[in-house]
Image (spheres, grey):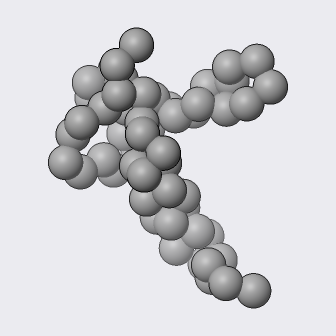
Amino acid sequence: MNMCRCPKVGLYEVEFKLDGMRSIAQHKNCGELLSEQQQNEIQKQMFKLWGIKGEE
Ligand SMILES: [Zn+2]
């Protein structure tokens, strides 16, 4: 499977799946896996949505 190269990935365009012991994020629009950088970006969006601040 290739990595997603979409310039912008929205939180609701991502599907989380389990791959063995770890979870992987897939971009629904293109069907590819998110890169580490994109996953971090999504995580930030999620934290913002939940009102969780990045730092302790
Ligand atoms: Zn994509």
Up-down: is 34 above or below 1? below
The answer to whether 55 appears left or right of 42 in the picture is: right
Query: What residue is rendered at 67% in x and 32% in y?
Result: 23
The spot of residue 47 in percent (x, y) is 58, 68
Query: What residue is rendered at 42% in x and 28% in y?
Result: 33
Residue 44 seen from this side: yes
The spot of residue 49 in percent (x, y) is 52, 69
The answer to whether 44 appears left or right of 17 in the picture is: left
Q: Quadrant of residue 43?
A: bottom right
Q: Quadrant of the C terminus?
A: bottom right
Please name whichever residue, 9 or 2, is drawn nearer the observer in this view of the structure: 2
Up-down: is 4 above or below 36? above
Query: What residue is rendered at 36% in x and 39% in y?
Result: 13
Please name whichever residue, 5 or 9, is drawn nearer the observer in this view of the structure: 5
Q: Quadrant of residue 34?
A: top left
Q: Quadrant of the N terminus?
A: top left
Query: What residue is rendered at 43% in x and 59% in y?
Result: 41
Up-down: is 17 above or below 41? above
